Amino acid sequence: MHEICKLLSDGQFHSGSRLGQQLGITRAAVWKKIKKLEQYGVQVETRAGQGYRLPQGIRLLEPELLRAQIPAAVAVHALVETDSTNAEAVRMLRAGDSDFIVLAEQQTQGRGRRGRQWHSPYASNLYFSYAWSVTKGVQQLEALSLAVGLAVYRALSRMGVADLGVKWPNDLLVANKKIAGILVELVGDITDRCNAVIGIGINVNMCAQQDIEQPWTSLQLELQRPVDRNQLLIEVFAQLQQVLLTQFEHGFAPLQREWEQAHAWQGRHAQLCFAERQLAGQILGITESGQLRMLIDGSEQQFAGGELSLRLSSDS
Ligand code: BTN
């Protein structure tokens, strides 16, 4: 299916018989692959006498281009399909790989925070995980997902996304609709050497309504144009390397102010939810180590990430 998509990526008509020749299959088998593409959410136009085309063309991930633009020390593994790039990265680390990016056209079991699913349709969005080796322990890991959120914020801001903000601990929102999420998982022993699997999902060209519980948007919806996921990955990774260098050398503290300036809900009234409990208060900001500061019943309280989630109060 990916092969036929590559052949159709130019947006021109291709006859069934020519596609069949190129792929070494019958016209009936071509038709089956076209149906599969449609099931994966790719819009295909069929015209009698001319064949098939993708009306807007499609830009697939280009591993060679990515390898040429991403520092050579970081290996790039581009997959057509995987369960989850984070899960794939964990398996690769356990098998002895290190310092790599793994990305995929599609995830069948994309993982979100708090056991949620991350919707990952084929050839539509960016799903990647970076295996970052941790040699400095707590300083490198403290507030890591906030730092990563800031890198994504910088990259999307540079593309001209308006109304963009970070939401504690690691969401990216456009006018309160989610555009990107981050999931950091650790592999190894944090008291010794370990790796952080930094998983980033960005809604890029997804436009149709998917079965997603929370309000969402995508870069294409915001910018009114399709976005090339290859260039986006290159830009996000460049920003990621910058914040990770700061994080490595000094920890999160130098990034705290910039994070607060990018904070979508700074000063807003919100509810903090954990287990069965909810606490209402005003969001004051974050500490130098990335804890959430809230004013609750007149006094400041600080909260670490984990299973907490934040919701705006209706009076905010
Ligand atoms: C969230 O906001 O809930 C976090 C979403 C993280 C999604 C990304 S997509 C790439 C990587 N692989 C996964 O399975 N999850 C992360």
Image (tube, grey):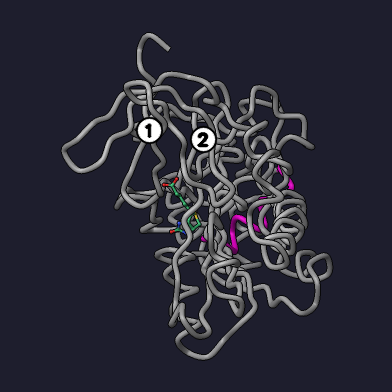
Q: Quadrant of the C terminus?
A: top left
Whether residue 76 is situated above or below residue 154 in the rendered picture = below
The reply to whether the C-beta atoms of the residues labelled 2 and 1 are less than 8 Å apart is yes
Residue that label 2 marks: 167
> Which span is picked out in magenta?
1-12
Side of 66 where 269 appears, left or right = left
- Marking on residue 101: none
Whether residue 148 is situated above or below residue 68 in the rendered picture = above
The image quadrant that residue 205 belongs to is top right
- Residue 7 part of the magenta segment: yes
At x 28%, y 29%, the residue is 279
**Dot 1 lies on which element?**
strand
Residue that label 1 marks: 310
Residue nearest the observer in this picture, 64 or 274: 274
Tag 1: amino acid: Leu
Among all residues in the image, which is located at the extreme left? 276
Q: Where does the image place residue 292, in percent across and percent down from the top left?
A: 46, 40
Among all residues in the image, which is located at the extreme front? 299
At x 57%, y 36%, the residue is 166
Whether residue 70 is situated above or below residue 292 in the rendered picture = below
The image quadrant that residue 308 belongs to is top left
Q: Where does the image place residue 86, in percent across and percent down from the top left?
A: 46, 66
Say if disc 2 is inside 8 Å of ligand 1: no
Residue nearest the observer in this picture, 221 or 261: 261
Residue nearest the observer in this picture, 74 or 168: 168
- Residue 251 part of the magenta segment: no
At x 38%, y 8%, the residue is 315
